[in-house]
Image: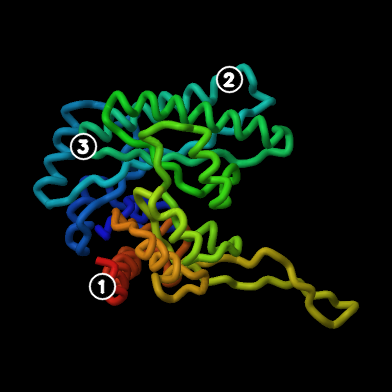
């Protein structure tokens, strides 16, 4: 499995240190990574700033000099219709955004653009949301295909978040350039069996993204009972890989058992144990490489 570092880890969100793309690329190589995933939004690979052939050539040359592959470009989508803004072509805007990223990905020698599905809304029937997501991803796939790019669905948002539903959604999309980007965060937190889920979907999975989390149970004090009442769900806190309790190791073992040998990305996309200093982020990023080696994943 090829280790990939996701640039969102160094984008300055959640209190983390911030690096520009020009700084991040050599930094990723220094940390020992063979590939990078680039966040398709500011402050990184936003079409507003980078949809220019000359700039993309310079960025690709920078990656080549540091012997780094651009393994994925990550779109941030939510294909849920908004009944309160029905006159606004929100889905059209996002499809065009994904097409822009696909064109930019081609310029960087990258053949994969990640998308999310949709968050559920109380004012949108689930069937309507499902059909909207299917139609939107079909349009993304058709436009991405013109650039030789695959659309990868990451199991992040509510619609089709369960592995069984995710496979069903992909079947409805029915495009040859639609793959899964299964990651452990959602299935492990929701209680799907990590090893079996990953093994069953390994053949459909072209890419995975890893982070590790510790479950911190919650409770509220009840003074009349002089006791605590459990509150759910637990708080999930990001920790260095190998220090969590959600089943990340079993998940990757399941992918391997199912025949997956693709890119395996590391991300720090929430506040992480130890804080957001560059030193701590680097420590976590290096730990991921070591964890891969210790467990025979590369």
Front: mark 3 or 2? 3
> Going by the picture, which residue comes out furthest to the top?
87
Instruction: Please determine whether, in this image, residue 125 is positioned above or below residue 233.
Output: above
The residue to which callout 1 is attached is 293
Q: Which residue does the image show at 42% across and 71% down from the upper left?
A: 249
Q: Is residue 63 visible?
A: yes
Residue 112 in the image: state x and y as whole percent. 31, 40
Q: Which numbered marker is on residue 41?
A: none
The image quadrant of residue 41 is top left
The first of marks 1 and 2 along the sequence is 2
The image quadrant of residue 208 is bottom left
Q: Which residue does the image show at 47% across and 73% down from the upper left?
A: 244
Local secondary structure at mark 1: helix
Residue 242 in the image: state x and y as whole percent. 40, 74
Q: Spatial distance from mark 1 to mark 2, Cα to Cα?
A: 49 Å
Local secondary structure at mark 2: loop
The residue to which callout 2 is attached is 88
Front-lying residue, 109 or 227: 109
Local secondary structure at mark 3: loop
Residue 223 in the image: state x and y as whole percent. 86, 77
């Amino acid at each position: 499995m090829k280790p990939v570092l996701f640039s969102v880890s160094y984008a300055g969100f959640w209190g983390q240190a911030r690096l520009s793309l020009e700084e991040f690329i050599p930094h990723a190589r220094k940390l020992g990574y063979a590939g990078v995933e680039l966040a398709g939004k500011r402050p990184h690979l936003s079409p507003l700033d980078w949809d220019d052939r000359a700039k993309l050539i310079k960025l690709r040359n920078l990656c080549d000099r540091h012997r780094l592959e651009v393994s994925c470009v990550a779109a941030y989508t939510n294909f849920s219709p908004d009944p309160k803004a029905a006159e606004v072509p929100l889905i059209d805007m996002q499809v065009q955004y994904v097409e822009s990223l696909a064109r930019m990905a081609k310029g960087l020698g990258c053949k994969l653009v990640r998308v999310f599905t949709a968050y559920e809304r109380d004012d949108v029937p689930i069937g309507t949301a499902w059909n909207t997501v299917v139609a939107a991803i079909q349009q993304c796939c058709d436009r991405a295909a013109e650039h030789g790019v695959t659309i990868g669905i990451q199991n992040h948002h509510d619609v089709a978040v369960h592995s069984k539903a995710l496979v069903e959604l992909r079947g409805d999309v029915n495009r040859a350039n639609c793959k899964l980007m299964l990651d452990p965060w959602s299935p492990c937190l929701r209680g799907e069996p990590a090893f079996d889920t990953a093994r069953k979907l390994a053949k459909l999975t072209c890419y995975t993204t890893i982070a590790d989390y510790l479950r911190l149970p919650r409770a509220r004090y009840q003074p009349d009972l002089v006791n605590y009442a459990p509150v759910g769900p637990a708080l999930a806190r990001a920790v260095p890989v190998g220090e969590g309790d959600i089943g990340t190791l079993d998940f990757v073992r399941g992918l391997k058992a199912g025949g997956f040998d693709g890119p395996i990305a590391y991300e720090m996309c929430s506040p992480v144990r130890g804080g957001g200093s560059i030193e701590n982020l680097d420590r976590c990023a290096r730990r991921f490489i070591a964890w891969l080696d210790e467990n025979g994943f590369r």
